[in-house]
Amino acid sequence: MITNDKNINKLFLYWLISSLVLVFFIIIIGGLTRLTNSGLSITEWELFKGILPPLNQSTWEFYFNQYKKIPQFILLNKGMSIDEFKIIFYWEYFHRILARIIGLFFLVPLIYFCFTKKINNKYLNICFAIFFLIIFQGVVGWYMVKSGLVNDVTVSHFRLSIHLIIAFIIISTIFWLVRNITKKKNKVFFNFNKENLPFLILIFFIFLQIITGAFVSGLDAGRIYQTWPLMGYSYFPNDIILNEFISIFDFNNHSLVQFYHRNIAYLITIYILFLSFYIYKKKFKNLFYPLKLLIYILLLQIILGIFTLISGLNIFLASAHQISSVLLVFTAINLYYFQAK
């Protein structure tokens, strides 16, 4: 139990659930910002100054002129009108505004719960760690944007992957904390015993897949080999030449990155099949339902991934694919939660 005060308990839980929903939304909006190539439309951090959008024509022209100085405009969007610029501007603007809202929404109640001294310190310490990650996420976000302002037409896919994985760590931590509170437990996530290890490995594989997904997105690697199950006419892309062992770690290679993303998906699918066999063989009946949820979401994620690719990266399918990746993380963590002691 968190405290003996039921009202504080409910308030604390509702705050965490609301925070989880907000982080879920910002992951969706962040994905759409990337899919619409809007992330470089605001070329300054503007931590405080950028709270309000442009309110007159001169301000719009100022932001547009700033955007005209970066390679993305010069090389890709030379003919863009100011009305077209407003569309990509608002995607990035809403992404940043929601980030500010999340920061304040998390900080102010956290201070209140801290001063009430009615919340378990273990939970509060986790919340402070989450808040630190939220702040760090803002810094990483600007660090990512800066990578596309000088020498490139897009942001670094490495920095994009860091930005995305931090978001998933934040939402996963909140989800685990919510599960602990609703079940009135205090389970530790990083408990590397023999029983927990198969489930932790699954979560590791999914997070690895999220990283390669960020690579694919950041490199626009989904724009090549838009066929399935083969990449063109072969399983392994025929435009890759691996002269040295180090070449297998060339994460700037579009074809290789897409190949890894596909095959980690196959690995996850096979691993879940083996894990299912293990669960049913051992008759872990408390895991049957959460396992079914995981399998349903996995199938959805696979279908969306395939159709996103063969559709030529339809923006709605691509966004749904990212949304289902969050659900896949939730269901994997939920399965592990029922197993964890």
Image: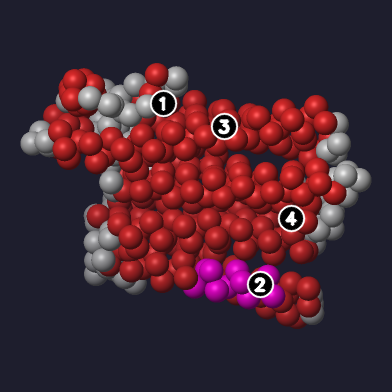
Sequence-first disc among 1 and 2: 1
Sequence-first disc among 3 and 1: 1
Amino acid type at image mark 2: Leu
Q: What residue would you read off at disc 4?
A: 179
User: Disc 3, disc 1: CB below 8 Å?
Assistant: no
Q: What residue would you read off at disc 1?
A: 51
In the rendered image, residue 29, in percent from the top left (x then y), is placed at 41, 46
The mark lying in front, picked from 4 and 2, is 4
Q: Which residues are magenta?
A: 289-299
Report the side of 65 relative to 143 (left or right).
left
Kindly identify which numbered label has been placed on residue 291: 2
Amino acid type at image mark 1: Ile
The mark lying in front, picked from 4 and 3, is 3
The mark lying in front, picked from 1 and 2, is 1
Q: What residue would you read off at disc 3?
A: 103
Q: Secondary structure at mark 4?
A: helix
User: Disc 3, disc 2: CB below 8 Å?
Assistant: no
User: Disc 4, disc 2: CB below 8 Å?
Assistant: no
The answer to whether residue 175 is seen in the rendering is yes
The answer to whether residue 196 is seen in the rendering is no
Residue at position x 57%, y 32% in the image = 103
Residue at position x 63%, y 35% in the image = 106
Sequence-first disc among 1 and 4: 1
Q: Is residue 291 magenta?
A: yes
Q: Residues within 10 Å of mark 3 (few under 14, many from 20)?
A: some
Q: Secondary structure at mark 1?
A: helix
Distance between the Cα atoms at labels 4 and 3?
A: 22 Å
Distance between the Cα atoms at labels 3 and 1?
A: 13 Å
Residue placed most toward the observer, 68 or 341? 68
In the rendered image, residue 10, in percent from the top left (x then y), is placed at 77, 49
The mark lying in front, picked from 1 and 4, is 1
